[in-house]
Image (cartoon, rainbow, N blue to C red):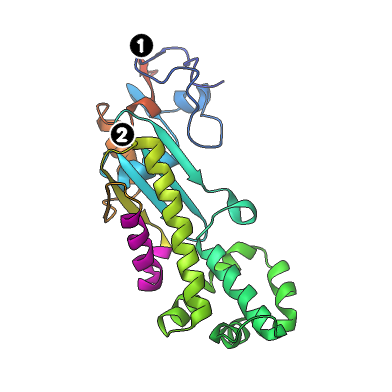
């Protein structure tokens, strides 16, 4: 049973989100049993992992958080608790600009060059060195237990080729930066309108360096929105702690709190 009906001995906070508000995240909220098992707590706060990750990265404040690794998802939360989630649709339908997206684009470029359909690129030799015979590359990827992770492993090689001046790799990195910047701008517009918002970038893709992050920052600046890129302050666990202790922040409309009304069992 969802938390719209608290378990026996608990009451729901008056400021919890109304029923019409769509909870950010994809799974059902924990029910009566999960809350009942809370370790003798007088209050339990429940929200999605996207919200705790956002709170951790921005110290509990409003703004936009881009999580970019194998996949990519952007979450914006405004001062009034407005929630915007952009992309994160998985490797087949979305995650544009992610590690898997970059790696897949790099491997496609390598195969096009291998066929003679595309321009020469250092990615062809890089793909052959990492994955072996390019004629067997589709089978290598298709038979992998995790194709997205396998292709994402090629993303640093694409970035490296771009840093060395490879034109094909450079174009891929710029396209990835454009996709990520577009997601951030969309989330910022939906969550904050034209108000200044900090932007934190988290995930393994942040270590890929200048070939991605420089055009990404340039595109955010060119968007015309008052966005300020800032280092992530913490992780989702930090965010969960912040939300548990502070009910006055912009995330509060996205948090469901239930309070114990009877003494816990001995």
Quadrant holding the N terminus: top right
Query: Where in the figure is residue 96, as x and y percent of width and height?
Result: 53, 57
Relative to 138, is 15 above or below? Answer: above
Q: Confirm whether the magenta stretch covers residue 107.
A: no
Which mark is first along the chain, 1 or 2? 2
Q: Is residue 143 visible?
A: no
Camera-side residue of 47 and 202: 202
Residue at left 41%, top 55%?
181
Question: Which residue appears at 43% of the width and 84% of the height?
Answer: 165
- Of labels 2 and 1, the one closer to you: 2
For the C terminus, the quadrant is top left
Comparing 260 with 237, the one in front is: 237
The x, y position of residue 144, in whole percent, is 68, 67
Residue 93 position within the rendered picture, expressed as x and y whole percent measured from the top left: 63, 52
Question: Which region of the structure is painted magenta?
Answer: 205-222
Is 258 rendered above or below residue 144?
above
Q: Which residue is mark 1?
A: 261
Relative to 227, 89 lies left or right? right
- Of residues 6 and 109, the one nearer the viewer is 109
| Residue 213 is inside the magenta segment | yes
As helix, strand or loop, the secondary structure at mark 2 comes to helix
Where residue 150 sits, quadrant-wise, is: bottom right
Number of other residues with Cα within 10 Å of mark 2, as a class: few under 14, some 14 to 19, many 20 or more: many
- Mark number for residue 121? none
- Is the residue 29 above or below the residue 224 in the image? above
Contact, CB < 8 Å: mark 2 with mark 1?
no
Residue at (37% x, 48% y) in the render: 65
Residue holding disc 2: 243
Q: Position of residue 110 (x, y in %)?
A: 62, 80
């Amino acid at each position: 049973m969802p938390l719209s009906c608290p378990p026996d001995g608990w009451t729901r906070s008056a400021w919890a989100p109304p029923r019409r508000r769509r909870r950010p995240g994809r799974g059902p909220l924990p029910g009566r049993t999960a809350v009942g098992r809370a370790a003798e707590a007088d209050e339990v706060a429940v929200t999605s992992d996207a919200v705790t990750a956002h709170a951790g990265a921005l110290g509990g404040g409003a703004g936009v958080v881009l999580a970019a690794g194998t996949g990519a998802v952007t979450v914006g939360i405004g001062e009034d608790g407005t929630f915007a989630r952009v992309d994160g649709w998985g490797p087949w339908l979305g995650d544009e600009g992610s590690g898997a997206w970059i790696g897949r684009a790099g491997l496609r470029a390598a195969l096009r060059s291998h066929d003679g359909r595309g321009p020469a690129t250092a990615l062809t030799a890089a793909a052959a060195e990492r994955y072996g015979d390019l004629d067997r590359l589709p089978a290598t990827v298709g038979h992998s237990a995790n194709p997205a992770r396998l292709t994402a492993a090629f993303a640093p090689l694409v970035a490296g080729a771009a840093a060395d001046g490879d034109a094909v790799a450079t174009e891929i990195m710029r396209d990835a930066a454009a996709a990520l910047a577009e997601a951030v701008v969309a989330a910022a517009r939906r969550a904050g309108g034209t108000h200044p918002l900090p932007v934190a970038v988290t995930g393994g893709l942040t270590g890929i360096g200048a070939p991605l992050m420089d055009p990404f920052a340039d595109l955010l600046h060119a968007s015309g929105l008052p966005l300020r890129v800032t280092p992530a302050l913490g992780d989702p666990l930090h965010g969960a702690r912040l939300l548990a202790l502070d009910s006055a922040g912009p995330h509060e409309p996205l948090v469901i709190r239930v309070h114990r009304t009877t003494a816990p069992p001995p």
